[in-house]
Image: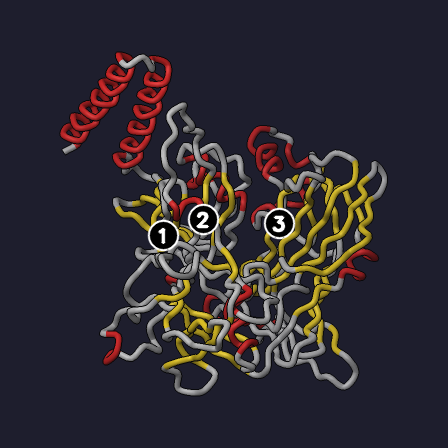
C-alpha cells in the first residue's frame, strides 16, 4: 500500500513539473518554475504527514485546512484526542512546530472544531514551549483523564508562505472573518424539563418586525461564556452548564439529527454581551453556508440558575505581599515535582551534578480570592478524582485554579506561566458567616459566599520563577478559574493585570486592574 502511495506521489510530482515545462514554453519560465517547485513542496509535505503513523505523531482534524483543527496524537497503534485542561500557547507552539508550521496563531478550547471523536490520550499537558515533540512535555499519563467530548484541544497554526507570481483564488469561507449580527435576534430554550434549560434556538427579526423560522445553534466552541449571554438575554439568571448535546432534542421531529435549519455557527462571546447577536458568528444571511463539524447530536444547549458564585482576585493583597526570594534548589525538590519552576531548572538538574547548590529567584506573593456571588463556589471535579499534593499535604480539587504570568512590552510571556492547582477552603469570612469548607482530613472543598480562600506567600508554588528574567518593567497577570471550567456570574473580574517593576534589589507591582482571563 505504501509503495502504491509513493508511486502516485511521484506521478503527481512529474505532472507538476510537466505543467511547469508547458508554462516555460509559453514564455513564463520564472513563474512556472517557482509554481512547480511550490506545488512539489506542498505535495511532499502533505503526503509525508499522511504516511506518518509512528508513535507520537500528530494530526489536526475538523479544520478548514491542514493548518488548523483539534489535535490528535498517535499512541499504541491508535489515534486519540487531547484534553484542553491546561492547554495554552506553549502547547500550541510545540504542536505547530512538530507539524512543520512556522508557529502558532492561537490555541483553541471547548471543542472549537467539534467534539472529540476518539479516546483522550493526554490530559493536563505542561510544555515549556521549546520541546521538539508533544510527547516530551509532562502530562498525567497515556489515557489518564477526566474529560468529556466537548473538551477537545485544538490549534490554529501559522501557514507557510506559499505566495507565487501566479495568483490563485481564495475560497470565500477562508477570507470572511466572523461578524456580529446587526439585526435583532430572538432566543428560546426548547426541550427542557423546566423553563431554565433546553436546546438553544434562534430566529432573525427584520426591521419591519417580521420573524423568520426558528433554527438551532451549532455546538462548535460552545461554552459557559456563550451560555451566560443566553441566560442573561432570556432573564433566566446565569449559566450553570453549557453543553454540546442533543439531549434536549425531540427524536420525533429531528430523527436524532440537527434541525434542518442551522442559523448560527462559530459563535464566540467575550462574556459580557447583552444579547447573542452581539457575539461573533460565522457569516449570516442569504447565501451564507453554516459550517458545523457534525450533523448528529451537536447543538448548543444550556441550563440556567437564578443564583451563582462570583470569584474576585484581591490584587491589593498581592501588591502588599509581593517580594523576592532566592532559594536553593535543594529546598525546591518537592516543588519541582509539581512543575512549579521554570524549565531551565530541570536542565540544570540534569546537567549539573551540584544542582542542589544552585539558587532560583522567586517572585512570591499571597493570592486571596473572594466569593462575592450568591451561591457557593464548588469544584467541578468529583471528589474521588481529587489529587494528593505532597508539598501541601492535602488534596487539590481543581487542576488549574490560577495562572501566574510575566509579560514583556511586546506581549510575549517571558517568565513561564505557572498553572497552580488549589485546595479550596474558607480561610476568612465576613462577620456572621460560618466557614463550611476545609481541606484537612479529605473534607469538602469550596468557597462560601462572603468568604475568602487564601494561599499565602510562604506556601510552596505560590510564586513565579524569574531566575532568567532581565531587570526592567513588565506586566504581571494573575488569573483565577482561567479556563472557565466552573460557572460564575461573570468572568471579567477573574484576572488582575498589573505593572511590574523588577530591579536588582526589589520588585513591586502597581496600577492593577481587573479584566477577563
- Residue closest to the far front: 208
What residue does disc 1 label? 81
Cα distance between the residues tagged 3 and 1: 24 Å
Task: Specify few, some or many for label 1: CA neighbours under 10 Å numbering under 14, 14-19, or 20 or more.
Answer: many
Q: Relative to 26, is 483 on the left or the right?
A: right
Residue 468 seen in render: yes
Q: Is residue 10 above or below residue 193?
A: above
Quadrant of the rendering where the C terminus is positioned: bottom right
Which structural element holds mark 1?
Answer: strand
Q: In the displayed structure, would residue 41 be above or below residue 498?
A: above
Which residue is identified by label 2?
176
Which scheme is used to colour this image of the protein? secondary structure
Q: Quadrant of the N terminus?
A: top left
Tell me where residue 86 appears, x and y as whole percent.
52, 53
Q: Nearer the viewer, residue 337 or 76?
A: 76
- The Cα–Cα distance between marks 3 and 2, rounded to whole angstroms, is 36 Å
Is disc 3 surrounded by few (<14), some (14 to 19) or many (20+) residues within 10 Å?
many
Is residue 86 found left or right of 288 in the rendered image? right
Q: Quadrant of residue 83?
A: bottom left
Tell me the mark number nearer the camera, choosing from 3 and 1: 1
Q: Which residue is mark 3?
A: 418
Q: Earlier in the sequence, mark 3 or mark 1?
A: 1
- Marked residue nearer the N-terminal end (3 or 2): 2
Amino acid at each position: 500500500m505504501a509503495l502504491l502511495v509513493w508511486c502516485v506521489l511521484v506521478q503527481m510530482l512529474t505532472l507538476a513539473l510537466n505543467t511547469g515545462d508547458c508554462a516555460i514554453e509559453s514564455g513564463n519560465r520564472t513563474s512556472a518554475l517557482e509554481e512547480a517547485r511550490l506545488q512539489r513542496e506542498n505535495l511532499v509535505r502533505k503526503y509525508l504527514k499522511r504516511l506518518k503513523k509512528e508513535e507520537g505523531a500528530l494530526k489536526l482534524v475538523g479544520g478548514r485546512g491542514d493548518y488548523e483543527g483539534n489535535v490528535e496524537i498517535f499512541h499504541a497503534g491508535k489515534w486519540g484526542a487531547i484534553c484542553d485542561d491546561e492547554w495554552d500557547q506553549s502547547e500550541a507552539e510545540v504542536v505547530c512546530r512538530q507539524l512543520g508550521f512556522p508557529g502558532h496563531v492561537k490555541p483553541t478550547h471547548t471543542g472549537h472544531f467539534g467534539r472529540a471523536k476518539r479516546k483522550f490520550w493526554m490530559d493536563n499537558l505542561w510544555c515549556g514551549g521549546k520541546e521538539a515533540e508533544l510527547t516530551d512535555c509532562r502530562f498525567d499519563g497515556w489515557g489518564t483523564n477526566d474529560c468529556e467530548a466537548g473538551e477537545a484541544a485544538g490549534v490554529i497554526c501559522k501557514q507557510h508562505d506559499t505566495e507565487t507570481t501566479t495568483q490563485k483564488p481564495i475560497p470565500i469561507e477562508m477570507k470572511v472573518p466572523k461578524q456580529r449580527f446587526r439585526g435583532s435576534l430572538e432566543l428560546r430554550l426548547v426541550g427542557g424539563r423546566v423553563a431554565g434549560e433546553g436546546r438553544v434556538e434562534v430566529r432573525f427579526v427584520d426591521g419591519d418586525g417580521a420573524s423568520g423560522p426558528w433554527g438551532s445553534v451549532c455546538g462548535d466552541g460552545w461554552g459557559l461564556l456563550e451560555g451566560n449571554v443566553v441566560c442573561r438575554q432570556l432573564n433566566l439568571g446565569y449559566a450553570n452548564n453549557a453543553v454540546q448535546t442533543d439531549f434536549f432534542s425531540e427524536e420525533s421531529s429531528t430523527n436524532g439529527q440537527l434541525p434542518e435549519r442551522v442559523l448560527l455557527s462559530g459563535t464566540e462571546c467575550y462574556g459580557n454581551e447583552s444579547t447573542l447577536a452581539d457575539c461573533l458568528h460565522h457569516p449570516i444571511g442569504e447565501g451564507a453556508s453554516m459550517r458545523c463539524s457534525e450533523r448528529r447530536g451537536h447543538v448548543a444547549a444550556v441550563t440556567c440558575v437564578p443564583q451563582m458564585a462570583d470569584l474576585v482576585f484581591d490584587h491589593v493583597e498581592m501588591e502588599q505581599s509581593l517580594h523576592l526570594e532566592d532559594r536553593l534548589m535543594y529546598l525546591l525538590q518537592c516543588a519541582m515535582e509539581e512543575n512549579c519552576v521554570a524549565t531551565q531548572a530541570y536542565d540544570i538538574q540534569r546537567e549539573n551534578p551540584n544542582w542542589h547548590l544552585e539558587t532560583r529567584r522567586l517572585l512570591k506573593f499571597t493570592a486571596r480570592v473572594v466569593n462575592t456571588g450568591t451561591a457557593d463556589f464548588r469544584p467541578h471535579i468529583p471528589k474521588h478524582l481529587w489529587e494528593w499534593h505532597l508539598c501541601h499535604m492535602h488534596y487539590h480539587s481543581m487542576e488549574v485554579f490560577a495562572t501566574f504570568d510575566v509579560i514583556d512590552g511586546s506581549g510575549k510571556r517571558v517568565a513561564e506561566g505557572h498553572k497552580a492547582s488549589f485546595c479550596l477552603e474558607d480561610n476568612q469570612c465576613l462577620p456572621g458567616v460560618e466557614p463550611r469548607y476545609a481541606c484537612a482530613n479529605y473534607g469538602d472543598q469550596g468557597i462560601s459566599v462572603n468568604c475568602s480562600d487564601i494561599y499565602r506567600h510562604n506556601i510552596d508554588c505560590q510564586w513565579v520563577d524569574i531566575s532568567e528574567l532581565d531587570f526592567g518593567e513588565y506586566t504581571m497577570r494573575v488569573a483565577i478559574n482561567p479556563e472557565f471550567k466552573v460557572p460564575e456570574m461573570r468572568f471579567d473580574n477573574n484576572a488582575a493585570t498589573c505593572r511590574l517593576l523588577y530591579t536588582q534589589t526589589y520588585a513591586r507591582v502597581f496600577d492593577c486592574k481587573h479584566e477577563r482571563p
